[in-house]
Image (cartoon, grey):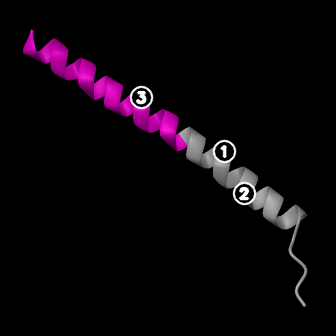
Amino acid sequence: MIAVVWHFWIGVVLAAGAIFAMFALVAAYFFSVSRTRYEKKQR
């Protein structure tokens, strides 16, 4: 029984990490695309 509960929580942690990693990759992509498209003009 302990092994089942332990594997369940390992799966929850891995799934949460994967979801966070995908969100971070999408956010980094949009930041890089918007930064190159709308560059600030230097004076």
Task: Determine whether the residue tagged by mark 3 lies in a helix, strand or loop.
Answer: helix
Mark toward the start of the polypeptide (3 vs 2):
3
Asked whether 35 or 1 is in front, the reply is 35
In the image, which residues are magenta? 1-21
Q: Where on the picture, by quarter, is residue 39?
A: bottom right
Side (left or right) of 29 relative to 42: left
Q: Position of residue 16 (x, y in %)?
A: 42, 32
Mark 2 to mark 1: distance in Å?
9 Å
Mark 3 to mark 1: distance in Å?
17 Å
Q: Nearer the viewer, mark 3 or mark 2?
A: 2
**Proximity of marks 3 and 1: CB atoms separated by less than 8 Å:** no
Q: Residue at x 8, y 15 (%)?
A: 2
Q: Above or below — where is 40 with respect to 28? A: below
Mark number for residue 15? 3
Please say whether residue 6 is one of the residues in the magenta stretch: yes
Mark toward the start of the polypeptide (3 vs 1):
3
Asked whether 33 or 7 is in front, the reply is 33
Q: Quadrant of the C terminus?
A: bottom right
Q: Look at label 1 and name its amino acid.
A: Val
- Tell which residue pokes out farthest to the front in this image: 43
Q: Residue at x 47, y 35 (%)?
A: 18
Q: Look at label 3 and name its amino acid.
A: Ala
Q: Residues within 10 Å of mark 2 (few under 14, many from 20)?
A: few
